[in-house]
Image (cartoon, helix red, strand yellow):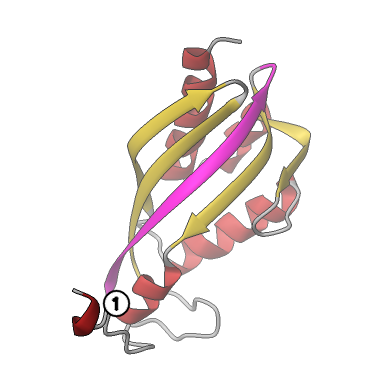
């Protein structure tokens, strides 16, 4: 598949997430897909997303950058949502968060077969008021 076709697969994955239509993912993700960052297979990934949608019912992801090389597609993604349900033991706060992340997907024959993600949940927990994070120390600026 071409680099543009691989990017199109990832765009469709993000569109499915934004519609909260996880059934579409069956057409975009191989049955043996593995999410290395969360140690999840496709069913585990769907369960994770359902829990996320319960906590943040307006969850939305925007691809800020997309780069492809070989069989891999890398995106820089911005996710937003309002905390209206329990999330990782935290009662709803009603606060809106933004989570920045970088995801890498390996695409084979038009389907995702592997994924990796690094998301800035520390910033999200700061936005939720769970932690105090002061950022870069003044002495290094």
Q: Is residue 96 magenta-colored?
A: yes
Percent across and percent down for residue 10 are 50, 30
Q: Nearer the viewer, residue 140 or 68?
A: 140
Give residue 120's quadrant in the image: bottom left
Element type where label 1 sits in the image: helix
Give residue 58's quadrant in the image: bottom left
Indicate left or right for 90 with 79 as reference.
right
In the picture shown, does residue 53 fall above or below 15? Answer: below
Q: Nearer the viewer, residue 91 or 122?
A: 122
Q: Nearer the viewer, residue 74 or 31?
A: 74
Q: Is residue 106 magenta-colored?
A: yes
Classified by dominant secondary structure, the portion drawn in magenta counts as strand
Percent across and percent down for residue 77 are 38, 46
Q: Which stretch is magenta?
A: 95-109
- In the image as oriented, which residue stretches furthest toward the front? 139
Give residue 33's quadrant in the image: top right
In this orientation, does residue 83 appear?
no
Q: Quadrant of the N terminus?
A: top right
Percent across and percent down for residue 71 are 62, 23
State the residue position of label 1: 127
Percent across and percent down for residue 122 are 41, 74
Which class describes the residues within 10 Å of circle 1: few (<14), some (14-19), or many (20+)? some
In the picture shown, does residue 44 fall above or below 33? Answer: below
């Amino acid at each position: 598949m071409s680099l543009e076709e691989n990017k199109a697969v990832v765009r469709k994955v993000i569109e499915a997430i934004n519609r909260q239509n996880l059934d579409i993912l069956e057409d975009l993700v191989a049955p043996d897909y593995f999410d290395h960052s969360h140690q999840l297979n496709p069913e585990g990934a769907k369960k994770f997303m359902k829990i996320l949608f319960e906590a943040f019912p307006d969850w939305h992801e925007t691809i800020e950058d997309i780069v492809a090389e070989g069989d891999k597609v890398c995106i820089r993604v911005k996710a937003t949502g309002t905390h209206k349900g329990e999330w990782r033991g935290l009662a709803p706060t009603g606060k809106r968060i933004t989570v920045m992340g970088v995801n890498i997907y390996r695409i084979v024959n038009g389907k995702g077969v592997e994924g990796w993600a690094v998301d800035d949940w520390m910033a999200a927990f700061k936005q939720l008021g769970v932690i105090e994070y002061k950022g870069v120390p003044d002495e290094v600026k």
